[in-house]
Each structure stands twice: as C-alpha cells, then as structure tokens.
Image (cartoon, grey):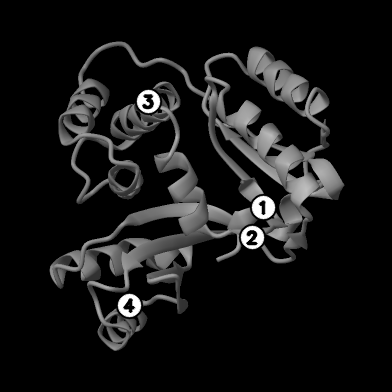
Amino acid sequence: MSGHSKWATIKRKKGKTDVARAGAWNKLIKEITIAAKLGGGDPEINPRLRASILKAKGQSLPARNIESAINKGAGTGPQEVVDEPIYEGYGPAGTAFLVKCMTNNKTRTVADVRNAFAKNGGNLGEQGSVAWGFKNQGIILIDAEAYPEDKVMDLVLEAGASDMSTEDDVHEVSTDPEAFEAVTKALEAAKIEMMSAELTYVHSTPVKLDADAVKKLMKLVDKLEDLEDVQDVYHNAEFDDADLD
C-alpha cells in the first residue's frame, strides 16, 4: 500500500513513541473539547463531535479521556476564542501541503508553521496556492479479515458511500462529507467495527517520490505534527512503505 494512504498514515501514528502518542492524544482531546463547546455534548445531534470521537477511537484514545473532553467542552465555563486556520505550502520535490490548525493565537501559529517549512525543505504558500487540488472526503477503514468485502460494500454503498477499495487486508471506504455520518451510523448499526473514520483531505494528483525525497518529506511532516497548534497534516506524496525504513 502506498504511503499516502490513510492506513499507512495511521500505522505510522500508532507506531510512534509514547511521548509522541501523548502529544497526538492531547490534540484529539482539544478537538473533541472544541466540538462539544460549539455544538453540545451529544454526538447524535453534533456531527462534528461524532466525527472527532470516531477519529479519536481510531487512534486508540481511551474512552475515559473522550468522556472527560466532552464534559469539559459541554460545561458552562467561559468560552475560549479558537480559530481554525488551514495553511498551504510546498514540501520536498514540489509536494503540496495543507496544515490544519486550532489556535488562540494565529500570529504564533503561522510563525511556527512557516519556520517548520523553512527549516525542512519547504516553504509556506499563499492562500489558494495548493488547496484547489485537495478534496474534503470521509475515509473509513475496516478490517477486511473480519468483514467480507461483499457484505461491507453493499452496506456502505446503500448508505451513500462513493467508493470502496480493499488492499493489505483493509477495506477503505470513501464518502462525500455530507454522507459520512450516514455511512458510519450504518456500519455501527450493522455492528461492523471501524478501525478509523475521519473527514480528511485527499489530493487529486499524487506525486510519486523516491526514497530520499520520502525521508525529507517525512521529516517535514513530523516537525509540523509536533507543533502544538497543528491538528492534521495532509500532502499529495505517494510512496511505498519500504521507503520509510
């Protein structure tokens, strides 16, 4: 499976050190808290919260942490003003990047993102420079060894999914953002466990990289993901898992 796939990305995140994983969990908690603040603590009537919870479960965030974040967000305390900018840029070999952030200080955040690009073979772009190539999609991953392809495909297509493919013992279901909730609810009703489910950005024109460029690209990805205000990093690089070794 190519390195730009969601399953490859999730395997990499799951394999990170405990310190790095704790940082990723803190970002998930922040995302859930904000979602609960904005739309309430009931995921059945708050689609953003529901999507955040599914994403958190896919990265093994403990249930108690999820519940605590919801309770904190749905409380009656003072509401912190949070912006959610998406920055655009270029990485090694001309790859396109979207960097999704959540911050209470955009001046600090854009400076940190610009610095990470500049020090790792890339540069921050202008608004609209690369976003045109990315499409917002729901991506759902399901264990192909546990659930037959025909059963899953029939269910998700009937629920509104746009496509499904199977590779490396994983079903990858694609949906438009508007159909994401309906498809995940249909899977839950059928008691089909999802390995991961989230709204993400997929580029229409992947760029194939060689092993040397992959190493440079992943260094930039890691530096961006290490920033406190960065929630997600998306790019259009395509490569083999072996190039990460």
Identify the amino acid type marked 4: Val
**Residue identified by numbered label 1:** 243
User: Which comes sooner in the sequence, label 3 or label 4?
Assistant: 3
User: Tag 2's secondary structure?
Assistant: loop
Discs 4/2, front: 2
Q: Which mark is residue 32?
A: none
| Residue depicted at 62% across the width and 55% down the height | 242
**Residue identified by numbered label 2:** 240
Query: Where, by quadrant of the figure, is residue 110 drawn?
Result: top right
**Residue identified by numbered label 3:** 18
Marks 2 and 3, Cα distance to the nearest angstrom? 25 Å
Using a 10 Å C-alpha cutoff, classify the residue at mark 2 as few (fewer than 14 neighbours), some (14 to 19) or many (20 or more).
some
Give the image location of residue 13, x and y in percent.
46, 40
Query: Where, by quadrant of the figure, is residue 168 drawn?
Result: bottom left
Using a 10 Å C-alpha cutoff, classify the residue at mark 3 as few (fewer than 14 neighbours), some (14 to 19) or many (20 or more).
few
User: Which comes sooner in the sequence, label 4 or label 2?
Assistant: 4
Viewer-nearest residue: 10 or 233:
10
| Residue depicted at 17% across the width and 36% down the height | 63
Asked if the residues shown at circle 4 and circle 2 are in contact, with their CB atoms under 8 angstroms apart, the answer is no
Asked if the residues shown at circle 1 and circle 2 are in contact, with their CB atoms under 8 angstroms apart, the answer is yes
Identify the amino acid type marked 3: Asp
Marks 3 and 4, Cα distance to the nearest angstrom? 35 Å
**Residue identified by numbered label 4:** 156
User: Tag 1's secondary structure?
Assistant: helix
User: Which comes sooner in the sequence, label 1 or label 3?
Assistant: 3
